[in-house]
Amino acid sequence: MTAAITHDTAAHRFTTTTEGHLSELVYRLEDGKLVIDHTAVPGAIGGRGIAGALVKAALDHARASGLRVVPACSYSAEYIRRHPEYADLVDA
């Protein structure tokens, strides 16, 4: 994945555009926690690691900001399970 990821703090989302297709991770802030609600990548560009890159960007942001993480979407929960280096951020 080489496309740049943009963090839109006002809209609470991370986005990237690949071959004209917008992918996004949507979150909300709640009591010092970054709650990952939704990760979406269009099928036309799926399977390229884009969703993983979006989740990684969100987790890195949470770590740098001192936020706990609630992986409310199934993809983000699975990403954290596969990348235990982020397990310390998880808050149920």
Image (cartoon, rainbow, N blue to C red):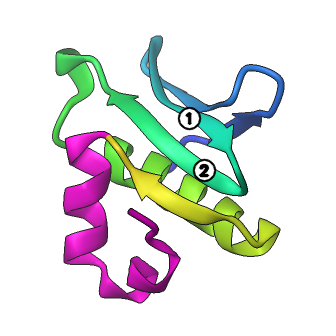
Magenta highlight: main SS? helix
Residue 41 disc label: none
Question: Which residue, given by chain and number where applicable, does mark 2 sit on?
Answer: 34
Question: Which residue, given by chain and number where applicable, does mark 1 sit on?
Answer: 27
Residue 64 at least partly seen: yes
User: Against 72, is 9 above or below?
Assistant: above
**Point 16% across, 41% down: residue:** 47
- Secondary structure type for disc 2: strand
Label pair 1/2, CB-CB below 8 angstroms: yes
- Secondary structure type for disc 1: strand
Q: Is residue 9 left or right of residue 3?
A: right
**Point 35% across, 53% down: residue:** 52
Type of amino acid at the residue the image marks with label 1: Tyr
Percent x, y of residue 78: 19, 59
Percent x, y of residue 3: 55, 41
Type of amino acid at the residue the image marks with label 2: Leu
User: Against 71, is 69 above or below?
Assistant: below
User: Against 47, is 17 above or below?
Assistant: above
Circle nearer the N terminus (1, 2): 1
Dividing the image into 4 quarters, which one contains the C terminus?
bottom left
Percent x, y of residue 4: 63, 42
Q: Please tell me which residue lies in front, 24 or 37.
A: 37
Residue 48 at least partly seen: no
Density class for disc 2 (Cα within 10 Å; few <14, some 14-19, many ≥20) is many
Magenta residue check for 10: no
Q: Which residues are magenta?
A: 73-92
Density class for disc 1 (Cα within 10 Å; few <14, some 14-19, many ≥20) is many
